[in-house]
Image: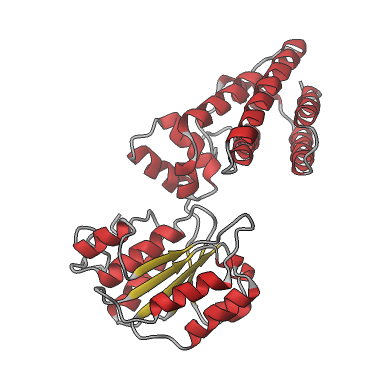
Amino acid sequence: MPWGLVGQERPLKILANMIGNGRLPHGLLLTGATGTGKYTLALSLAQALNCENPEPDRSPCRQCVSCKKIAGDVHPDVSVLNPKGKLHIIRIEDVRELRDALNFRPYEAKYKVAIIRSAERFREDAGGALLKTLEEPTPDTVLILTAISPGGVMETLVSRCVKVKVSPLSRDRIFAALSAKGLDLKLSHILAGLSGGALGLALGLDSALTLSVWDSVDRLFGIAEGPKYLKAAIEWTATFAGEVEKLEKEDETGGKSRFMALVMDSIRLWWRDVAVLAATGKNEALLGPPPSMAQKKWAKTITARTVVGLESAMAKLADGLNRSMGLTLMFENYWLDVLQYF
Ligand SMILES: [Zn+2]
């Protein structure tokens, strides 16, 4: 994994060729979904441009002083700009500061590199200020912008950058990368299923929490009797609501919304695999772990109509939560909707 990225052979080949020919553009825009590795790639590029001992494929050695300084965020010629503040924006002051830093020739590197993350978040005047830097480049400087898609970035900036797309990986590729890291097999399956092709997203999920959410959902849907199921579902909701409340108070980094997303995505993945198992009878097309007893049982009886009904129940739940309706009420409605199909 010389570039620090799994997969992404295509963009890496393009970039390595540009570096090899000494024709890396002054402005680069790396696009791709959250967690696909845009920032990792940007850092690797900064290293590759300045590496004292690059590999034959132009990737950085990661051992030399320059590579280590960049990895440790202490290289004087490499700067990273993140959106700031509550509004999470890039302000004109930030761009001016960056421009000042880029105005000098590199201190010790071959190239000065500025990495600008979430390029969607430029305030208009800030974007205008950066435009000047893109249009009148100082020599030996490279600006690397990252964004989810070019559509979200100011058109004037996009048009002055060479665009390189970082694509999601296949589910199997993510599973292989996770299990190669020594992660438990079942957990690797669940994380791969939840990742949507973004390895960084899978790696960012809390392992123990992910397993426990998955198992709790599996246990709940595995209860065959209606009254017992409802009782367990209400208990589950109370525990869940308690956790969410705690996160809301204690975690200001968006822990609450991440936890809610994990739960919703786990429920979706669980049912998705039941439906696929029912349709194909095979494990190969599943995105999550090998089917549990509960999933196998549901797969035997589930009909296309049930699948549609469950999907609309989930959509109703997601919509209610998005509009900040009472969490307990929304979930209890959802469990009742599922009960119809017992
Ligand atoms: Zn190096």
- On the question of residue 28 being in view, the answer is no
Q: In which quadrant is the C terminus drawn?
A: top right
Residue 288 in percent (x, y) is at 53, 35
Along the viewing direction, whichever of 171 and 109 lies nearer the viewer: 109
Q: For the image shown, how many numbered marks are present on the structure?
A: 0
- Percent of width and height locating residue 267: 64, 33
Describe the colour scheme in one phrase.
secondary structure
Q: Residue at x 19, y 69 (%)?
A: 52
Could you tell me which residue is drawn at 26 percent across and 77 percent down?
Answer: 110
Residue 96 image offset from top left, x and y in percent? 50, 76
User: Would you say residue 111 is visible in this rendering?
Assistant: yes
Q: Residue at x 41, y 67 (%)?
A: 11
Q: With respect to residue 84, does 220 lie above or below? A: above
For this rendering, which residue is in front, 311 or 100? 100
Q: Quadrant of residue 313?
A: top right
Res. 153 image quadrant: bottom right
User: Where is 173 relative to 105, above or below?
Assistant: above
- Left or right placement of residue 333 versus residue 245 in this view: right
Give the answer, above or below, for where 224 lies relative to 85. above
Residue name at image x 65 percent, y 33 percent: 271
Indicate left or right for 124 with 226 as reference.
left
Q: Nearer the viewer, residue 341 or 167?
A: 167
| 228 displayed left or right of 22 | right
**Horizontal and vertical percent for residue 230?**
75, 16
Q: Quadrant of residue 151?
A: bottom right
Q: Quadrant of the N terminus?
A: bottom left
